Image: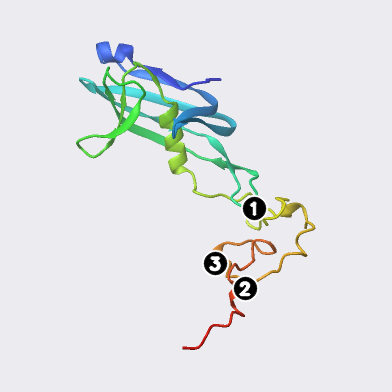
Amino acid sequence: MSETPRIHLGSLLRTSSDAHAEGNLDHLTYPQGGAEQTLRFARPAPFRVDVNSLGGSEMYLQGRFQPALILECARCLRDVEVPLDLRLGTLLRYDPSVGAPYLDEAESGEEVLVFGDPDLDLSAYLAETALLAAPLTVLHAPDCKGLCQVCGHDLNEGPCEHMAQVPVEEIDDLLGVPEGSAHSRQNPFAGLRDLKLPEE
C-alpha cells in the first residue's frame, strides 16, 4: 500500500528516459487553504502514471486513477461512497527553484504541473483531479430526511421530540427539501403573511 504517490524523475531529467509509478492509496493528504486536508477512500485506490520526456525541462504525464471517494451526505452527513475512474493527462515542467508543486497554465493554454523536486509527490495533483471530477453534493439516499435543525437528530432514524413543536409550512419541492422533513420545510417568511402594512 502506497502512503504517498511519488514518481522518481531524476533519470528522466538526465537521460530523457521514461518513468513509471503505480500503487494503491488508502487516502490522500494535501495542502489547502493553509491547512492539511485528507481525502478518504472506501477501499484501496489504484493509480498508475507514466511520464515521457518532451525535451528540455518539459514532459508529459498520463495514467489512470480509480478512487472510491468517501464524501458526506449533504442532508444528514452520513458517509457516501463515490467511485471514480479518472484518465490522467497533464504537462510537467521542471524548475529547480520551485518548492511545492503547483498547477500553472502553459503558453498553449494547457494546464502544466510545475515541480522542483525530481522525487515528485503527486498527492495534490491526484486530490485536485478527483475533487474536480466528483459531484458538488451527494445524498446517501434520494429520500434522505436530513437532520433536526434543533437537536441534530438524524430524521432517517425516526422522528424526534421537536417535530411537533415547530410549525410546518409547505415549500416548493424544487428547492431540494426532502419529503417529510418537518424542520427543513419551514418557510422563513411565513410570519409575514399576517403583517398589516399602512395604506398610502
Along the viewing direction, whichever of 85 and 124 lies nearer the viewer:
124
Q: Position of residue 131 (x, y in %)?
A: 46, 40
Coloring scheme used: rainbow
Residue at the spot of label 2: 191
Q: Quote the CA–CA distance across marks 3 and 2.
A: 22 Å
Along the viewing direction, whichever of 22 and 102 lies nearer the viewer:
102
Task: Name which of mark 2 and mark 1 comes first in the sequence.
Answer: 1
Q: State whether residue 86 appears in this view.
A: no
Label number found at residue 174: 3
Assess disc 1: are there few (<14), some (14-19) or many (≥20) residues with their C-alpha within 10 Å of its C-alpha: few
Question: Residue furthest toward the right?
Answer: 161
- At mark 3, the secondary structure is helix
The disc labelled 2 sits on which kind of residue? Gly
Vertical relation: 20 (above or below) 148: above
Residue drawn at (64%, 52%), measured in percent from left and top? 141
Assess disc 2: are there few (<14), some (14-19) or many (≥20) residues with their C-alpha within 10 Å of its C-alpha: few
Quarter occupied by residue 32: top left
Q: State whether residue 164 appears in this view.
A: yes
Residue at the spot of label 1: 141
Q: On the rendered structure, is 16 left or right of 63?
A: left
Task: Name which of mark 3 and mark 2 comes first in the sequence.
Answer: 3
Q: Position of residue 115 (x, y in %)?
A: 32, 23
Residue drawn at (69%, 69%), measured in percent from left and top? 168
Q: Nearer the viewer, mark 3 or mark 2?
A: 2
Q: Quote the CA–CA distance across marks 2 and 1.
A: 32 Å
The disc labelled 3 sits on which kind of residue? Leu
Q: Nearer the viewer, mark 2 or mark 1?
A: 2
Vertical relation: 155 (above or below) 10: below
